[in-house]
Amino acid sequence: MKKIFCVLLCVLPFIYFPKEVHGAEPVTITISGNVATAKLTGEPDSYTVQSKIYDTLINQKNVIKLIIDGKFGEDNASGMGRQLSYTNISELEVKNSNYLPSQFYCAGANGQPGKLTSYKDDGTVKELMWSSLSTSSNYKDPNRLIYFESPSAEKIYLGVFDGFRGEELIVPQIKESVHNTSSNYNNFEQMPNVKKINLSGLEELTGYGLFTEMPNLTSLDLSNVKSLTSMNFLNNNNTSPTYVNLSNLITLNEKYSVGSKTSTNPVYIKLGNSHPEKLFNENTNAIFYKSISPKLNFEVEKGTDIKVSSIGDSSFLSYNTNDCKVIWYIDNALSQYVGTDINVETNNLSEGVHSLTPVISYKGKEDRGFFGNMTINVNVYEKKLTAEPASQTTSLGIDISKFDYSKFVKNVKLGDQVLSSDQYKVELINSLATDTVGTKTAKIRITLKSDASKTVEVDVPVEVGWGNSVVYGSYDYGANGRTSAAFTLYTESTPTIVASQGQNDDNLAIHSNFPNQQYYTFNWFDLSNKQILKIDESNNGDKYIKASGNELKKDKLKEWGTAQNQAVNYGDIVRAWQTETGKNWLYENEQKQAYNDAKKAVYYEITTSGYRPLHFNQLTPKTGKIPIYSTNIYLDEHVKDYIDLKGYSNIDVKGFVEYPDTTSSGDKRAKILVEETLTTGKKVQYEYEVTINVEPGTLTYTVPKTLTFKEFSKSKSEQIVQRKYSGSLGLLIKDNRGSNKQGNWTLTAKASSDLKGIAPYLIYRNEKGVDSYLNGSAVPVYTQDKQVSATEPLEVEVSNKWKSTDGILLKVPSKNNLASQEYSTIITWNLVEGP
C-alpha cells in the first residue's frame, strides 16, 4: 500500500484564460452514435479541450468512445476537476497529436471510478503526462485499462500504466519512465492480470515497488536497463515462476533486496557479463544467472568421478540456498545429488548412457521450466582397450608374414593405462596386398591377453613403395604409368628377389603391340660357385622369366621362383632386358633411374646395398687401323685401342678372343674380351665384336745399279760371257698386298736399241736354255702367279734364282765390232701387273 497521496495536486485553485482562436473554434465536437470526435484547431491548451469535452459529454451517457484529432497546447488542466473519468468514455483514441495531457482521464482522489479500458494512438503521441490514464490503487476504483497501443511513445510519467489490467504490456519503444521522487510513485505495479511485459527500450528504472503486486507475471523484458534502483523490486507473491531479462544491468540498488521473501515460486533473472557484483537475494526468491550452456555429453570410464554442471563453466547461478536447490534426476529417478555443479560417482552407474536432468526446487516445489528439456548424457563404459595407428612404409612384394605387427600400433591403453607389448596380442585381420605400389590399409586387431573379450581394431595406413626394384613399363591402358613387372631386391641374410606387378592391379596383356614377340626377360646368374662368368645375351642364366607382349601380366609373374620369390646370393648378377629401351628402369630411394644406356639389356650386381649397375656391356668398340700382315703380338699390344672403357676403373680389356684376318686388306671382324670386377672380387667377362681396318699393302721392286760381266777376248767362235758376280744382285721384288691381290705380275727387261757397243749382245736365257735378246721388245725375266690365299708377304730376289748359265748374259758372236775396251749400256726394268 502506498503511504503518500496526490491530494494537493487535485485541490489547488487554478485560473486559466483560454487562448483566443481567430476564424475557428479551438475545439469542435461531433457525435455519431456512441462515438464523439473532438477536433482541435490551433493547439488549444488542455484545460480548454478537457472543459469542452467534459461539458459536452457529461450528460451524453450513450457516448463511450472518444477520438481526439489534433495537437494540444499548454498542459494546464491538472487539478481543475475536468477529468474525463466523469463521463462514460471507456475507449480513447488519439491521432494527429503530440502528447496526452496530465490528468486527462485519471480521476482525482474524490473523482469518479475510472471506466477506460482501451487506449490507442496513431504514433504521433510522444509523451503521456502524469496520471493521464490511470489512478492510484488506493482510490475507490482501480485502473480498468486492458488495452494500450502507442507505437511512438518514448516518455511516460507516473499514472499511465499503474494498475493496468491487461495480460500483455508490450511497449519496447518507451525509453524513459519518470516517477515521482517524493512519493516513489511509479508506472509499473498493481497489475493483477499481466503475464508479459516488454520494456526492452528502457535504460534506467527507479521508484518504489517496481513490478510488485503482479501475481501472474511470467515474463519481464528489461534487456536494455543498465541501472535499477527500485525499492522492493519484484516483491511479488507470484503464482508461477517469473523470467526477467536484465542482460545489460550494471547497477543495482544496494539497500534493498530483490524478489519476494514469501513467494513459493522463483524469479529467474538473466544477467550479462557486466552484472553487479552484489545481487541482494540472500532471503528472496530471486535466482540470478548469466547463461545456461553446460556440457551435454560425457564419455567416462566406469570408476572415474566426473564434474557435471547444470549451467556450464562460463556461467553462474546465484540463489537463496535456504529455500532453493538444484536437484538432479538420473534416468528419471531423483538422485542424491544436489547443487549447481555435482561430482558424479560412476561406480554407482551401470555401463551405458545415463540421462542427468537438473531441476530447480524452491521451497520444496519443483520447477522444470528453468532448465526446460535439457538432458545431460553420461556414457559410462568399462575400461576400453584403445590404440592408435602407426603408419608403415614398406616395399613391393614384401612377405607380410614377416611383419612385426606390434609396430603397426602405438599408445595401446586399457582405459588410461598404457600397456606394454607383452600385455596384448596384435594380428592382421584383412588381406594386405603389397604387389602394387600405393597406400594400403592394414586392419589390425589388438586383443588383451588377460581378457580376450577386450579387443580393438585399428586401420593402419601402409605405404607400399618401389623399394630397390628393376621395373619394366608396359602398354599403359589407364595412362597412369602401368608397369608389367617389378623385381624387388630384399637385402637380408639371404637376399631375395620378389616379382610384383608394380603399378596397377590387372591381368591384361603385357603389351598388345608386341604379340608373340619377346617383350622382356629377367635373368639371374648364380656366381656362388664361380670366380669368373663369361656371359652373352644368349645365356639365360640359372633362373629367368621371359614374357611376350600378348601374355597376361599376373599370370606371367607366377613363373618367377617359388610363389614369385627367388633366393639369390650377394655377388650374383641379374640381367634386365626390355625391348622398349625407354621402359627399363631401376628404382632407388623411390626415384626412377635408367641405367641401360639406351640398350635393351642392363646388368646389375646383387650387393648388400641393393642392385649395383654394371657397365661391361655398355662400352663402345672403336674402329682401328692396322698394317696388313700385322701379327697377333702387334694386335695384343694394341688391343685396348679398340674398346672405349669410358673411364670405368673396374673394367679391363683381357685381349682378343678372335683375331682379325690380316692377310688381306679391308674391314675385318675381331672379338675382344672385357672383364668387369665385382665388389666381391669375382669377375664377369663379355665379348665385343670390333671392326679393324687392315690397311692395303704395296707392290715394290728394286733393280741393281749395274750388272758387270766378266772380261772376254775375241774368239773365232761364239761365246757366252757370264756375269762377273752371282747371287743377290739387288733385283728384288716385294709384294705384301695380301690374299687375292699378291702376285699376278711379270718383271721384264729391255736393253738399249743402240747397235753399237754391247747392247745387241745382251740376252736373257731362261732355265730351259732359251735365249731372248734384250735389244728388241721387253723380255719377261720373271713371272709371279696370283696368290689367292697368301699367308705372308711375297719377296722375290730374282737374280738369286739365276744360275751362272742363265739369267742376263752376253752372247758374243765370233764376228763382232767390239774393240778391246769397256762397254756399258742401259737395261730398263718393268714390273707389269696382270697376266
Image (cartoon, rainbow, N blue to C red):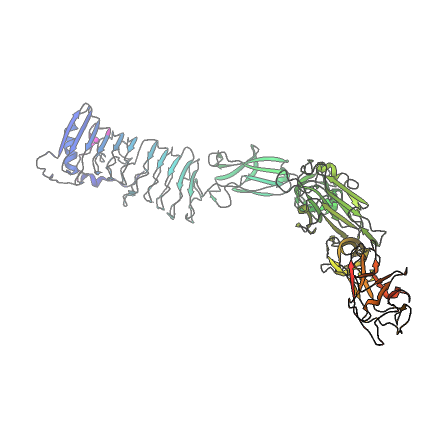
The percent coordinates of residue 320 (x first, y second) are 46, 42
Q: Quadrant of residue 81?
A: top left
Residue 679 falls in which quadrant of the image? Answer: bottom right
Classify residue 16 by image quadrant.
top left
Q: Is residue 554 visible?
A: yes
For the stretch drawn in magenta, the main secondary structure is loop
Q: Residue at horizontal 84%, vertical 57%?
A: 791
The quadrant of the image that shows the C terminus is bottom right
In front of the other: 584 or 137: 584
Outermost residue toward the left?
23
The stretch drawn in magenta includes residue 82 = yes
State the residue at coordinates (91%, 68%). 717
Nearer to us in this view, 780 or 246: 780
Residue 568 as seen in the image, left or right of residue 173: right
Q: How many labels, in total?
A: 0
Residue 38, x across and y down, in percent: 17, 31
Residue 412 horizontal side relative to residue 312, left or right: right
Q: Is residue 682 visible?
A: no
**Quadrant of the rendering where the N terminus is positioned:** top left
Measured from the top left, where is residue 470 in percent x and y?
71, 47
Asked whether 120 falls inside the magenta stretch, the response is: no
Magenta region, residue range:
76-91
Question: Picture coordinates of residue 246 (x, y %)?
Answer: 39, 42
- The residue nearer to you, when weighing 653 against 85, is 653
Determine whether 804 is above or below 689 in the image: below
Vertical order, 641 against 505 (above or below): below
Classify residue 114 as left or right of residue 598. left
